[in-house]
Structure formats: structure tokens, C-alpha cells
Image: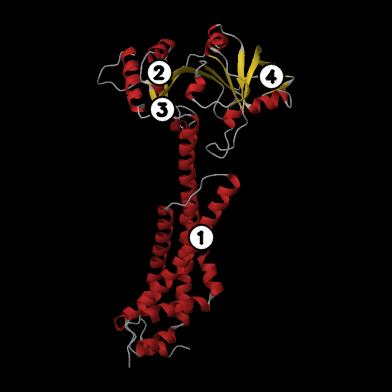
Amino acid sequence: MKKFSLKSGMLLDLRQIVIDSILAHRLRSGLTLTGVIVGTMVVALVGAVLTGLSQRVADVTEKNSPNVVYFTKEERIGPSLQRPTAEERQRPELNYGDVLAVNALSSPRAVSPQKVRGSYGPSANVPKVTANSNTAINPLILGVWDNYPELTNIPIDTGRFFTSSERKERKSVAVIGAGIAEQLFEEQDPTGEFLKIEGRLFKVVGVLKKASGEGVIGSDELDERVIYIPFETFVKSYPGIEQTIIVARGRDGRVDEMIEDVTNVLRRRRGLAANVPNNFGVNKAEQIFTLVNDVIAVLGLIVVPIALASLFVGGVGVMNVMLVSVKERTAEIGIRRAVGATRNTILMQFLAEAVLLTGLGGVIGISIGLVLAFLFRVIVSFPTTVPFWAVAAGLLASVVVGLIAGIYPAYKAARLDPVEAMRAP
């Protein structure tokens, strides 16, 4: 009689036994897999979102601010969940002399100072901008030089950007985002019209194109609510705002050279010794979106435990099903042992059944994650792609859950006494 042993080439029979066992209890197996499916689906989706965000930041940076570097008083620029440290708050501000010194360098392609009134994110300190009895929603006012379009992509829809003479003469002119234009002037063309920025009258000389909807998180509403005014006009209007940002665009392939040159100039002007670290920030354009990474990190603290909890619940369910399966098939196990199956064979059979069960759940979960990522990409125009590491992590997690959940039931099955097992009803 041919013994039931892996050594005697019965691996295919073992696989068929496992598959038949799962198919015989479809509903029970399906319900058991729910936790594993949800857990691996979450892993796939998180991987897709992270990959999509990374790609979107790179695309937006390349499109809007290629080779652009922001030199700031604090380490970071733009919205962030982290507050500036006490040391950062005590640093001296960058000033107009710093801007002129950087502008005199040959390595930058273009340089402009920038002052900001308003907030990149939600804020209670919102400047008041009105026209035609309408009020703009959370406007962001930037004071810049007339060469600012050389640094970042500023798509003009109607009108123009302000000129060098308008800047030097401190003219009250403004270039406004499409959202501001719609809120204040509705269907009317704002070019040539006037608006009030905190009580001061400004003439609209240009309107930006409507946002493309291809920003970092599916939209670029910042471009919709921005208002550009001449830097000198900003200084005259807001003498209390001291913070100045130096925006510099490097030449292709020479960004690092530019950063080194500007850093050396600023260190010299700020009197820093060679062994003293920088007391200013150097931020490439993509670092403006640091908030995105901060938010993802926070979401990870929420989502990852959910995935782990789902896998744990799935593992408990698998263990329960396997224990029930051992009890239901006690007589079968006794017969197999009687005809030559070893304890190792029985052990491997039940371990294989648990791993195949959870592995199937992992494949289903990842498949659902792939479909959802595709739908997200199509509906929201977000570049979601499930990376290989997410697929591998999901499958590995599901297999590990199967191994852990199946060890005790498999061991219990393998330790059954053949004679006593065959007497089971």
C-alpha cells in the first residue's frame, strides 16, 4: 500500500485535499477571510496613496516650480503640523540686503523676495479683500518682484503681470487668482476693475487661469485664492510684516551649486563661524508639501492599527475554523494515520490549509485594493499605483497570519491517537 507521505510524492494530493476542504465550507471560509481581506486591502490602498502622493508632488514641482529653492528664517516653509522651535523663532529675519546680495550671484537663473499676508492653510488671521460688496474667501497675498513668473509657472488668463516700473513706483496693482475673481466679480471680467485689500484700493491688471485640478491632493486651490502685488507696495502696505523669503531658481543641472553659493553668502552676511550650523532654512520646492507627509504619518497611526486589527481578527477566525475542522475530521485523521500518514504529514496538511485560506484572503484583498486604486485614479485624477512592496507586504502578512493561526490546530490534529480518532462519530 502506498503510504500517505510527502516523501512519496503526495504533495499534489495534499494540495487537493486542502482545496476540497475549503470548497466544502465556502460560506464559513469566506466569512473567516473577511478580516484578512480588509487588512491586506488597507495595506494595498495605503501603498497606492503614498506612491501617488510622491508622484504628484514630483509632477507639481516640476510643472510649477522647477529648480526653485526657498531660503527662509525657519527650517520649513509652507503649512506644517510642527511648530517652529524657540531657536528658530529667535533667529534674525532675512532682509532686503540679503535679497540683493543673492541676486548679485551668477549661479541663480532668477531671484525674487517674497512676503506673505494670510495663511497657506486655514487660519483665523485672514486678510479682508472686497469688491462689489463681495468678500474673498481666505485670500493669500504675496508681495514679489515683477520677475516672479520667471521663477514659478504663473498662467495668466486675461491681462498681464505687473511691470518693473509699477513695482519700483509702488503702484497699487494686483494679479488675482481665478477663485478670487469669481468670488468678487462673478461673471464680470475683473481686468481693469478695482478691489480693496484691507481698505486699500488696488487695480486688477491680470487674472490667473482657473486651476487645473492637478495639485498635490487633486486640486490646486492655492492658485485660486492667491493675490500677487508688487513687493515694494507690500512693504508700504504692511510695514509690520518683517519676514522675507528669498526665492531663487537654479539653472538646469546647477541647483546644488546655487544652493551652496547662496548658503555661503547668507552665512557670511549673518556672521556665522565655520563650525556654527545655518540659522536659516533651505527648502526645495517639493518641501513645501511637507504637510502632506505629516498628514500621511498621522493617518498611518490610525490606518495601520486598523489593518493589524483586521488581520488579528482574521487570524482568530482562521484558528477557530481550523479547530472546528480538526474536530469534524477526527475520524478522517485516524484513517489517514492508519493507512500510513505520519504526524508530520497531518501537521503539514492543516498548516497548508490555514496558509492557503489566508493566502487566498490576501490575494482577494490586494485585488480589491488594486481595483479601488484604479477607480480612485480615474475618478479623482490621482496617480495611485499599488507598489510592489505593498503587494509583497500584504501577501506576506496573510501567509504569516495563516502560519500563526494554523500551528495550534495542526499540532492538535497531528497528536491525535489513531485508534481513538477512528472511533470518533
For mark 2, give the secondary structure: loop
Task: Name the side, left or right, on which 313 lies relative to 160.
Answer: left
Compute the Cα span from label 3 to label 2. 19 Å
Render colour scheme: secondary structure
Q: Nearer the viewer, residue 318 or 363?
A: 363
Compute the Cα span from label 1 to label 4. 51 Å
Q: Dot 3, how many residues are within 10 Å of its Cα: few (below 14), some (14-19), or many (20+)?
A: many
Which residue is situated farthest in the bottom direction here? Answer: 1
Q: Is residue 197 visible?
A: no
Instruction: State which mark lies toward you, 3 or 2.
Output: 3
Q: Nearer the viewer, residue 137 or 307?
A: 137
Marks 1 and 4 close (CB-CB < 8 Å): no
Q: Amino acid at mark 4?
A: Thr
Residue under numbered circle 4: 130
Compute the Cα span from label 3 to label 1. 39 Å
- Residue 283 bears which disc, if any? 3
Residue at 59 percent of width and 37 percent of height: 213
Q: Amino acid at mark 2?
A: Gln
For mark 4, give the secondary structure: strand
Compute the Cα span from label 4 to label 3. 33 Å
* Sequence order check, earlier mark of 1 and 4: 4
Q: Amino acid at mark 3?
A: Asn
Residue under numbered circle 1: 367
Instruction: State which mark lies toward you, 2 or 4.
Output: 4
Compute the Cα span from label 2 to label 4. 35 Å
Q: Nearer the viewer, residue 240 or 11?
A: 11
